[in-house]
Amino acid sequence: MNDQQLLRYSRHILVDEIGIEGQEKLLASHALIVGAGGLGSPAALYLATAGVGTISIADDDVVELSNLQRQILHIEARIGQAKTTSAQAALAVANSDCRVLPLPRLEGAALIEAVAKADIVLDCSDNFTTRYALNQVCVSLKKPLVSGAAIKLTGQLFVMDPRQNNVPCYACLYPQDSTDEDLRCATTGILAPLTGVIGCMQAVEAIKLLAGFGTPAFGLQRYDALTGMWSKSGISKDPCCPTCKA
C-alpha cells in the first residue's frame, strides 16, 4: 500500500482482526455482485469504499424513477442508463482505486466464467431462477456465496462457503419446487432502508470472508423491520440435495 492508501484505509488497519494484512487481501480481491438494485447498491458501495480491488457488477436493467426510492447507486440524472453503467459511475466517485467491471445478464458459460474469476459472489438478485443458477455454479467452483433478499418489511441473509465441509447450499435451504417466483418488490412493495440493512450485512460477510477474519454467518438470518428483531435458523446440509450431490 502507498501512503494515500494507508491513510484512506487507516480505520480498517486499526482493527486488530483486519490490520495491514487483511486490508492488502481486500485490495487484491475480486467480488462479483449480481444485481445492481436495492441490495447491490449498498453492498457495492461498501465493498468499494472498503478497498475491494475489483468489483464485477452484473445486471441487464436500466435505471427507472421507481428505483430511486431504495437503489442508492443511482440518481435522477442517470434515469434511462444501464444500471451497470450508473453503478460504475457511482463507484468511481466513491473510490477511484476500485476497478469496476460492468457485466450484462449472466447465463450459461458467461455465468461460469464470471464466477470463476471472482473470489466471492454476492447474490443481490430479485428472482429465484438467478439465485439457483448462482448457487449451483458457486457449489461447483467452490466459491463462497453471500445471498440476500428483502420484500415488504422482511429481509434475510444466507452465507455459504462450499470450501468447508458440511455447509448447506441455497438449494438445501429452499428446494427448487418450494419457491414462489412472483414475490417481487414491483408487485408487493418494500421498505427502502430494509434493502440497506441486508445489503450492508452482505458487505460485512463478504469482507470477513475476503480478509479472513471472524466467523461466517452460516445458517439463515431474518430481519423483521416491523419489530426490529433478528432471528437465526440453523440449516443442515440436505443429503438428497441435487446441487450438493452433483
Image (tube, rainbow, N blue to C red):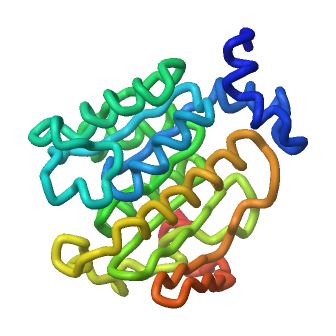
Which residue is pictured at 43% across the width and 81% down the height? 154
Q: From this viewpoint, which residue is outermost toward the top?
A: 2
Visible residue check, residue 219: yes
Residue at 32%, 69% in the rendered image: 128
> Number of numbered discs present?
0
237 up-or-down from 28: above or below: below
Q: Is residue 108 left or right of residue 244?
A: left
Position above or below: 218 against 204: below
Query: Vertically, is 177 above or below 243?
Result: below
Between residue 18 and residue 11, name the one nearer to us. 11
- Pick whichever, 243 or 52, lies toward us: 52
Farthest right residue in view: 16
Position in image of residue 30 (x %, y %): 55, 32
Residue 139 visible in the shown view: no
- Residue at 65% across / 81% down in the picture? 235
* Percent coordinates x, y for residue 16 in the rendering: 90, 42
Which image quadrant for residue 22? top right
243 displayed left or right of 165: left
Horizontal relation, residue 203 to residue 32: left or right: right
The N terminus, quarter of image: top right
Return the x and y of residue 140 as percentages of the image width and height: 53, 52
The residue under the point 17% across, 46% down is 63
Q: Position of residue 57 (x, y in %)?
A: 37, 38
Query: Of residues 246 and 83, which is closer to you in this image?
Result: 83
Q: Is residue 93 above or below residue 199?
A: above
Q: Residue furthest bottom?
A: 227
